[in-house]
Image (tube, grey):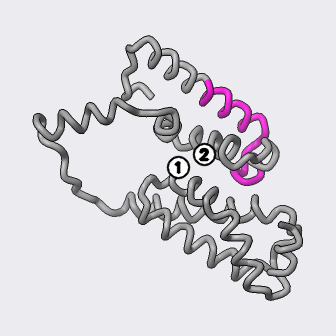
């Protein structure tokens, strides 16, 4: 990838497109874990890609492209979340019976990925970067601007929450709201 990044920095648009296409599934997955809405993910991906392309020549170490674009994407996602908080949306809620009963039965079929998505944002992002993006603790620390100890602590806390969830799930006494 480093060679492709250098080509892209010299103006090779096709090299940049190849890099983005290679990283796209992972970047989208990260955006989805933060934003949870497909349309917001598409917006964040588009903005992050555009910003990365425009400032590609400022990247000093091409070997850190992946970490760099992840940071850009996280910043875009956070900006979308801030904008979303300023907007009040009235969603239709299911009625207490009928359609809602089926809805809540389906809801109880939650899997581990959904449990991860229910974690607090700080824990969810660290889990996602570590397990889904395969970033080492040092790079996660740099991307999020926190200490390596804080990354380890968040991983430990999130793993504990998820382990409790799995244990309760096996025992059949899981309350989904407790995640």
Q: Residue at x 42, y 65 (%)?
A: 39
Q: How many labels does the image show?
A: 2
> What stretch of residues is rendered in magenta?
141-159
Q: Where is residue 22 in the image (x, y as percent from the top left)?
A: 70, 65
Q: Position of residue 167 (x, y in %)?
A: 51, 15
User: Alpha-carbon distance for marks 2 and 1?
Assistant: 7 Å
Image mark for residue 33: 1
Helix, strand or loop at disc 1? helix
Few, some or many residues within 10 Å of mark 1 (<14, 14–19, 20+): many
Q: Position of residue 37 (x, y in %)?
A: 42, 57
Q: Residue at x 61, y 70 (%)?
A: 48
Residue 156 falls within the magenta-colored stretch: yes
* Left or right of 120 on screen, residue 20: right
Q: Where is residue 45 in the image (x, y as percent from the top left)?
A: 56, 68
Residue 2 falls within the magenta-colored stretch: no
Q: In which quarter of the image is residue 61?
A: bottom right
Q: Residue at x 83, y 74 (%)?
A: 4
Helix, strand or loop at disc 2? helix
* Left or right of 102 on screen, residue 10: right
Q: Nearer the viewer, mark 2 or mark 1?
A: 1
Image mark for residue 125: 2
Q: Residue at x 52, y 64 (%)?
A: 79
Mark 2 vs 1: CB contact within 8 A: yes
């Amino acid at each position: 990838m480093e060679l492709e990044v250098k080509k892209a920095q010299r103006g090779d648009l096709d090299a940049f497109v190849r890099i983005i296409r290679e990283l796209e599934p992972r970047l989208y997955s990260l955006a989805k874990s933060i934003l949870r809405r497909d349309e917001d993910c598409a917006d964040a991906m588009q903005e992050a890609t555009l910003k990365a392309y425009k400032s590609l020549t400022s990247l000093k170490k091409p070997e850190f492209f992946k970490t760099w674009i992840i940071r850009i994407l996280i910043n875009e996602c956070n900006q979308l979340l801030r904008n979303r908080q300023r907007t009040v949306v009235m969603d239709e809620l299911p009625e207490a019976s009928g359609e809602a009963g089926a809805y809540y039965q389906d809801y109880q079929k939650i899997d581990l990925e959904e449990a991860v998505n229910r974690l607090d944002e700080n824990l969810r992002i660290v889990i996602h970067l570590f397990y889904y993006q395969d970033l080492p603790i040092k790079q996660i620390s740099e991307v999020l601007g926190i200490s390596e100890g804080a990354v380890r602590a968040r991983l430990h806390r999130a793993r504990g929450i998820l382990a409790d969830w799995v244990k309760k799930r096996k025992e059949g006494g899981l309350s989904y709201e407790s995640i």
